[in-house]
Image (cartoon, grey):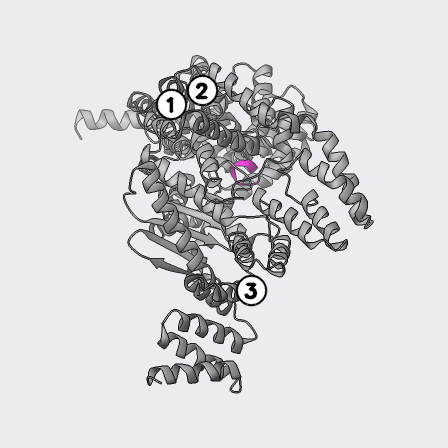
């Protein structure tokens, strides 16, 4: 053995002896975590193993946790808390384990119990902040601030505040909080990752910050995952995928990143690799709700049918594909043609639209994203929507939602995903209201209250209203405000200025820069002019909101008591106080009901026509209007009214039967064929008449072979059905030239 080899062996033996001596004196959890933080995973494992032999159950719990023996760790924490019920720190650490293992409810309970035992426990408030942050709850900011008030040097709280600020698009605050963390600890890895995210979101190189991460821990994949998270929130899905791959390259066992990679690939319309990544995560114990539900959703895809052409890919559940395809396909094509002309561009590839009859399946597509109660979501050139069958009738306008999301597809493509959230959401709200009379969301009570209470945000800060709302309805209010801003720009400067702003964002301009460049004013001057315009339009309605609400309650009681004279006497004034209100228990329906009861169907039709024009969506009310229009000799308007329901709740056999008849009478052959086939798609009990109506529609359109097929189907269902027999004879005679 040469001298160098002997020296190496002696050195290794000495290091081992020193390590053993260290653990003989009992390592601490902090020492083990420091080893892991620096990427010394083998040493960290040995260290955590030593902790499992400690006398204290709280220390043993830390050891099992570090070894990823989560159930053992959970059991030890339970023992520790039972033995030391007054110890707040055991509850905090147990709560952190629960949070890490996808049990935020129990985690929050444990953190709260810790606060009750020790109101000055900064780590407990940090734990509460982490739980709130998962749900984009604004309480996260309050709780993190509380933790820092107690312990200003709590690095992790500064790092969390940096992440929260960046999620809210406040890069200045994010950088400041990250810097605070780095002043306290030069090895604050998440703070470095936030700085890297700030750089890449500004289209600058993040390499210097990521190099600093690697100097501390070359296997710290979480840094890349943090960057990926912020890219995802800014709708840069391809870039997010690239950084998740970097996270996995750094740490192949970072199952959270693998899961998120699978989910992001699903968002981009992929299926095979998402399944591989999600199954790998699941098989290695990473079983959070997003992973489990995404796997279930992928499994459910076998129940979907896919329809492709050169510009569209449509995925529909097989139970409703036959019914919905003609409507979705036509509206998708119409939106593409309209936006191509308006935005002066073509999309680089086909658009994929997925329609989910189970809202929970749709919700899986939005997991980990802000915006509760969403009806649609856009991932690049992939759009996911709720199906009208998945929502109560009258509560969802799928046509508006499709046009809203398609606006996103075009604007995100035009700007290479470099566009603030307020602008793309506001433009989509603006666009959906232009498609057809009555489209677009009305001014809701929550919006009026926000206007009354002066809660709208300055345009330069409007993004804050979308991610982490400061009051329950702020997201709804922010959508409305964004849409109204675009309405105002169009009214004052025209559509060209909106397109100019799109181009400014594509050139990486900020909102203040885009406003100054295109509208020739500062954001502050814009706010002043916009709010004056808005309050001129809605200020009076907002100011009288409480009076209106009380008077509507009175009107509802009068209608309930069938006091129709008083309803008619007071109802019109209530309606005019807040004409946009078309939700449940509205003045329009009370008035029409009173008119019908008093025998004035003409007046009932007038008020319901105004209800439809303003955006009323109750299918029963619209069907009542169509009946009144038909009775008064206006079948054309009756058909238009019924056709409105197709964009709200087309899962209605009676609707399609009535439209089938009306379109036939008006010689609208395309509409007639579509509606008669919609009846058949709903598998009606009366097959004979449904098949006959389809045959009649095809015959009128000159498609004799299809007409004959449907007539034979009608007669198969009811051999003696005379209308089918008669039309079949007519077709035969026509074919023979008689």
Q: Give the CA distance from mark 2 to mark 1.
A: 8 Å
Say above or below: 169 vs 83: above
Q: Do we see residue 244 in this rendering?
A: no
Which element carries disc 3, helix, strand or loop?
A: helix
> Closest to the observer: 334 or 624?
624
Q: Which residue is mark 1?
A: 198
> Magenta span covers which residues?
98-103
Residue 222 x, y percent position in the rendering:
40, 32
Residue 447 x, y percent position in the rendering:
61, 31
Q: Which residue is mark 2?
A: 174
Query: Badges 2 and 1: C-beta atoms under 8 Å apart?
Result: yes
> Closest to the observer: 349 or 85?
349
N-terminal label among 3 and 2: 2
N-terminal label among 2 and 1: 2
Residue 73 x, y percent position in the rendering:
55, 39
Q: Residue at x 38, y 33 (%)?
A: 228
Q: Which residue is mark 3?
A: 658
């Amino acid at each position: 053995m040469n001298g160098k080899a002997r020296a190496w062996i002696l050195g290794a033996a000495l290091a081992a002896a020193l390590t053993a001596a260290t653990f003989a004196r009992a390592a601490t959890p902090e020492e083990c975590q420091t080893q892991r933080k620096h990427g010394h995973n083998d040493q960290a494992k040995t260290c955590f193993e030593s902790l499992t032999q400690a006398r204290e159950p709280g220390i043993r719990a830390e050891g099992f946790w570090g070894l990823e023996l989560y159930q053992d760790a959970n059991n030890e924490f339970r023992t520790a808390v039972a033995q030391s019920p007054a110890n707040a720190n055991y509850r905090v650490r147990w709560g952190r384990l629960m949070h890490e293992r996808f049990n935020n409810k129990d985690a929050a309970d444990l953190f709260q119990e810790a606060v009750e035992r020790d109101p000055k426990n900064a780590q407990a408030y940090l734990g509460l902040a982490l739980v709130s942050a998962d749900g984009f709850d604004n309480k996260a900011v309050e709780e993190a601030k509380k933790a820092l008030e107690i312990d200003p040097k709590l690095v992790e709280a500064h790092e969390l505040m940096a992440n929260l600020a960046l999620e809210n698009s406040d890069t200045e605050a994010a950088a400041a909080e990250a810097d605070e963390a780095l002043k306290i600890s030069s090895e604050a890895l998440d703070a470095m990752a936030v700085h890297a995210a700030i750089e890449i979101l500004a289209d600058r190189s993040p390499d210097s910050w990521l190099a600093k991460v690697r100097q501390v821990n070359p296997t710290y994949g979480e840094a890349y995952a943090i960057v990926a998270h912020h890219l995802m929130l800014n709708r840069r899905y391809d870039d997010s995928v690239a950084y998740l791959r970097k996270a996995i390259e750094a740490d192949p066992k970072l199952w959270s990143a693998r899961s998120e990679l699978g989910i992001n690939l699903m968002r981009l319309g992929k299926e095979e690799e998402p399944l591989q990544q999600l199954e790998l995560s699941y098989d290695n114990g990473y079983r959070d709700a997003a992973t489990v539900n995404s796997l279930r959703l992928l499994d459910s895809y076998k129940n979907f049918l896919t329809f492709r052409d050169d510009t569209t890919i449509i995925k529909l559940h097989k139970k409703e594909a036959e019914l919905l395809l003609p409507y979705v396909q036509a509206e998708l094509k119409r939106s593409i043609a309209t936006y191509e002309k308006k935005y002066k561009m073509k999309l680089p590839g086909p658009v994929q639209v997925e329609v989910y009859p189970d809202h929970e399946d749709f919700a899986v597509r939005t997991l980990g994203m802000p915006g509760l109660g969403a009806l649609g979501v856009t991932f690049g050139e992939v759009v996911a929507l709720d199906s009208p069958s998945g929502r109560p009738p009258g509560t969802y306008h799928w046509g508006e939602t499709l046009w809203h999301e398609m606006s996103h597809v075009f604007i995100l493509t035009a700007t290479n995903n470099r566009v603030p959230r307020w602008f793309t959401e506001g433009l989509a709200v603006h666009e959906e209201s232009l498609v057809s009379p009555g489209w677009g969301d009305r001014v809701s009570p929550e919006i009026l209250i926000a206007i009354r209470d002066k809660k709208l945000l300055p345009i330069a800060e409007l993004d804050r209203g979308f991610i982490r709302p400061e009051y329950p309805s702020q997201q709804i209010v922010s959508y409305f405000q964004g849409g109204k801003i675009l309405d105002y720009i169009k009214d004052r400067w025209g559509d060209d200025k909106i397109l100019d702003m799109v181009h400014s964002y594509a050139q990486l301009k900020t909102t203040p820069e885009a406003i100054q460049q295109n509208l020739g004013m500062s954001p502050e001057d814009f706010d002043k002019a916009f709010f004056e315009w808005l309050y001129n339009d809605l200020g009076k309605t907002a100011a009288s909101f409480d009076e209106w609400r009380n008077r509507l309650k009175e009107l509802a009681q009068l209608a309930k008591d069938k006091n129709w004279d008083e309803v008619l006497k007071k109802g019109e004034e209530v309606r005019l106080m807040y004409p946009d209100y078309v939700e449940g228990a509205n003045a329009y329906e009370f008035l029409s009901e009173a008119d019908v009861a008093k025998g004035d169907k003409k007046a009932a039709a007038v008020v319901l026509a105004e209800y439809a024009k303003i955006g009323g969506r109750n299918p029963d009310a619209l069907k009542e209007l169509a009946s009144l229009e038909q009775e008064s000799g206006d079948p054309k308007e009756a058909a238009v009214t019924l056709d409105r329901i197709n964009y709200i709740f087309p899962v209605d056999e009676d609707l399609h039967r009535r439209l089938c008849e009306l379109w036939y009478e008006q010689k609208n052959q395309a509409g007639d064929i579509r509606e008669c086939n919609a009846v058949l798609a709903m598998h009606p009990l009366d097959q004979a008449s449904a098949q006959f109506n389809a045959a009649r529609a095809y015959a009128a359109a000159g498609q004799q072979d299809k007409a004959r097929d449907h007539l034979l189907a009608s007669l198969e269902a009811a051999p003696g059905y005379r209308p089918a027999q008669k039309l079949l004879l007519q077709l035969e005679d026509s074919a023979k030239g008689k």
